[in-house]
């Protein structure tokens, strides 16, 4: 299902978290659970992965992660501010010590000049640390490729918190 390089990346993330006795949560919009799915491809991931939130709709972001509705209305669901709020909400609403959140435009439609297809905001949060963020403009590579690149970038960002 996933490429060998992605599986190796997931193994490293899980091993690093395990070594530090950290649990992980995911908060996913455009990736639709692929990050959690990748992590659970690795045997033994249950001692690290606490849960995954698939929050595709704005309402789900509000209900499950406590992302303020006015923040979504003001910044848009695909924004740095919402990605940061999603990551923070995933830690607050789980038994995890750290979380990664992804929100973006996977296409093929839905893009605008300010938020084109391929724009993905990723944020990672660890208890008692600053939230880190990256914006990626993958381009209009096709829905599957954008989502897989977002998964890889999310795990790489999460690794910066170990």
Image (cartoon, grey):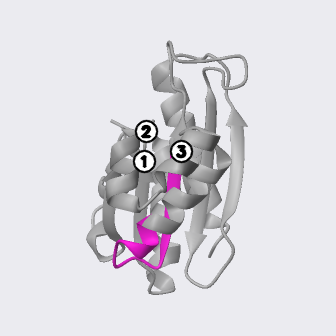
Task: Specify whether residue 31 is painted magenta.
Answer: no
Seen in the picture, residue 134 relative to 32 is either above or below; the reply is below
**Which residue in the structure is indicated by mark 2?**
31
- The outermost residue toward the front is 70
Q: Are marks 3 and 2 in contact (CB under 8 Å)?
A: no
Q: Which mark is residue 72?
A: 3
Dot 2 surroundings within 10 Å: few (below 14), some, or many (20 or more)?
many
Q: Quadrant of residue 31?
A: top left
Looking at the image, is 5 positioned above or below residue 156?
above
Of residues 147 and 58, the one nearer the viewer is 58
Q: For mark 1, does the 10 Å Cα neighbourhood hold few (<14), some (14 to 19), or many (20 or more) residues?
A: many
How far across and how far down the image is residue 2, in percent? 39, 38
Q: Position of residue 68 (x, y in %)?
A: 49, 56
33 displayed left or right of 67: left
In this rendering, position of residue 40 left or right of residue 66: left
Q: Nearer the viewer, residue 64 or 139?
A: 64
Mark in front: 3 vs 2: 3
Left or right: residue 115 compared with residue 151? right
Q: Quadrant of the N terminus?
A: top left
Q: Which residues are magenta?
A: 90-102
Which of the marked residues, 3 or 2, is nearer the chain's N terminus? 2
**Which residue is disc 1 drawn over?**
28
Picture quadrant where residue 11 is located: bottom left
Element under disc 2:
loop
Quadrant where the image shows the C terminus: bottom right
- Residue at the spot x=63%, y=42% of the render? 75
Evaluate whether residue 38 shows in this view: no
């Amino acid at each position: 299902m996933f490429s060998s390089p992605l599986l190796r990346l997931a193994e490293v993330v899980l091993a690093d978290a395990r070594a530090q006795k950290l649990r992980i949560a995911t908060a996913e919009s455009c990736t639709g659970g692929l990050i959690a799915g990748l992590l659970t491809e690795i045997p033994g991931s249950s001692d690290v992965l606490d849960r995954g939130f698939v929050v595709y709709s704005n309402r789900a972001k509000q209900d499950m992660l406590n992302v303020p509705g006015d923040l979504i209305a003001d910044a848009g669901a695909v924004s740095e501010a919402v990605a940061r709020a999603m990551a923070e909400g995933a830690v607050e609403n789980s038994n995890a010590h750290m979380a990664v959140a992804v929100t973006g435009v996977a296409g093929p439609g839905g893009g605008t000049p300010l938020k084109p297809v391929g724009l993905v905001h990723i944020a990672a949060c660890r208890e008692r640390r600053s939230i880190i963020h990256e914006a990626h403009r993958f381009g209009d590579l096709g829905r599957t490729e954008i989502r897989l690149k977002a998964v890889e970038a999310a795990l790489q960002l999460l690794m910066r918190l170990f």
